[in-house]
Amino acid sequence: MPALKYSRQREAIKSFLMTRKDHPTADVVYHSLRADFPNISLGTVYRNLTLLADLGEIARLRLGDGVDHFDADTSRHYHFICSECGSVLDLHTEFPDSFDSLHGTSVDGNRIDGHAVYFQGICHCCLNKQHS
Amino acid sequence: MPALKYSRQREAIKSFLMTRKDHPTADVVYHSLRADFPNISLGTVYRNLTLLADLGEIARLRLGDGVDHFDADTSRHYHFICSECGSVLDLHTEFPDSFDSLHGTSVDGNRIDGHAVYFQGICHCCLNKQHS
DNA sequence: CTTTTTGCAAAACCTTTGCACAACC
DNA sequence: GGTTGTGCAAAGGTTTTGCAAAAAG
């Protein structure tokens, strides 16, 4: 693994992500950063997002909508995808997770290291719109 | 919605999927069917997979590896993705799923309609290779 | 000065789509 | 005959990559 050097772009990408709670896509990050870095390229955004995710400093969310989302909040929490508008929200409630106990165990001969859970439904915002 | 007409290709796609337990991608279905349908096109495969999934006759699995997988087994079961080789396996064990009870309820103002769970780890096959 | 990062553009991928022709009913 | 499905090819969208120049150490 090569040594890591500082880059203003990478720092800005991480800072930007930390200000957002809506799990932006690479494209959203790119367009938002162009205010401060008019010449930043989409390739750089992707490279840094991948790097930060590999370092564990951010989380990459693959939610099945065909686009990767990124989250600076790496603490344990669940995600909710609105079937209506596609927005991704954190679920702050603490759920008992019976799957945790499977980590490290073997099921059908396969070693389980982790699991992912995400919820679908209609978000607060879209529910309100339906009432009007 | 238009009326549904029979097609040999669609039938073959579904039959093929029923013979497989490894959750093939559209491309795998395509290449496998070319033995019987030398002129079948990838577009036709995608169209029929999407149609069958919409009809609920097969399941589309979005497992976060960037490619859709398809499963003729629509019964309730969990999926396992090998971090090493990427293969997708069924987990036949019955796990208690405490998330079921959330369906229809409201969390943080968002209505929860469903959820998805998948497991990651090292599959039986790759574990054996590591020992040699 | 050496190594890493960037910007740009092109390429790689997966999936969808338009259209004329074939298949179905 | 009217409608739906197919094959082909092109387009769409997301992500990766090659390369020369710029930045970092």
Image (cartoon, coloured by chain):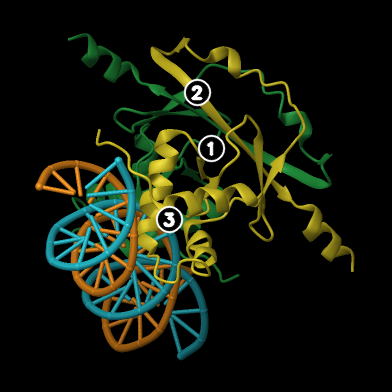
Chain colours: A yellow, B green, C orange, D cyan
Q: Name the subunit of mark 2.
A: A
B122 vs B88, nearest the viewer: B122
Point 74% across, 26% down: residue: A95
Q: Which residue is mark 1?
A: B74
Point 35% across, 20% down: residue: B123
Question: Residue A43: where, in percent of width, then height?
Answer: 34, 60
Q: Which mark is residue A9?
A: 3
Quote the CA–CA distance across marks 3 and 2.
32 Å
Q: Name the subunit of mark 3.
A: A
Q: Residues within 10 Å of mark 1 (few under 14, many from 20)?
A: few
Q: Which residue is mark 2?
A: A114
Point 69% across, 42% down: residue: A90
Q: Which mark is residue B29?
A: none
Q: Residues within 10 Å of mark 3 (few under 14, many from 20)?
A: some
Looking at the image, is A122 positioned above or below residue B21?
below
Question: Residue A56: where, in percent of width, then height?
Answer: 46, 33
Q: Name the subunit of mark 1.
A: B
Res. C22 image quadrant = bottom left
Task: Label 1: state its secondary structure.
Answer: loop
- Which amino acid does the dot numbered 3 rest on? Gln
Quadrant containing the N terminus of chain A in the rendered view: top left
Quote the CA–CA distance across marks 1 and 3.
45 Å
Front of the two marks 2 and 1: 2
Task: Label 2: state its secondary structure.
Answer: strand
Looking at marks 3 and 2 on the same chain, the residue that comes earlier in the sequence is marked by 3
- Which amino acid does the dot numbered 2 rest on? Gly
Instruction: Say whether residue A96 is visible.
Output: yes
Asked whether disc 1 touches disc 3, contact meaning CB atoms under 8 Å apart, the reply is: no
Point 77% across, 33% down: residue: B102
Quadrant containing the C terminus of chain A in the rendered view: bottom right
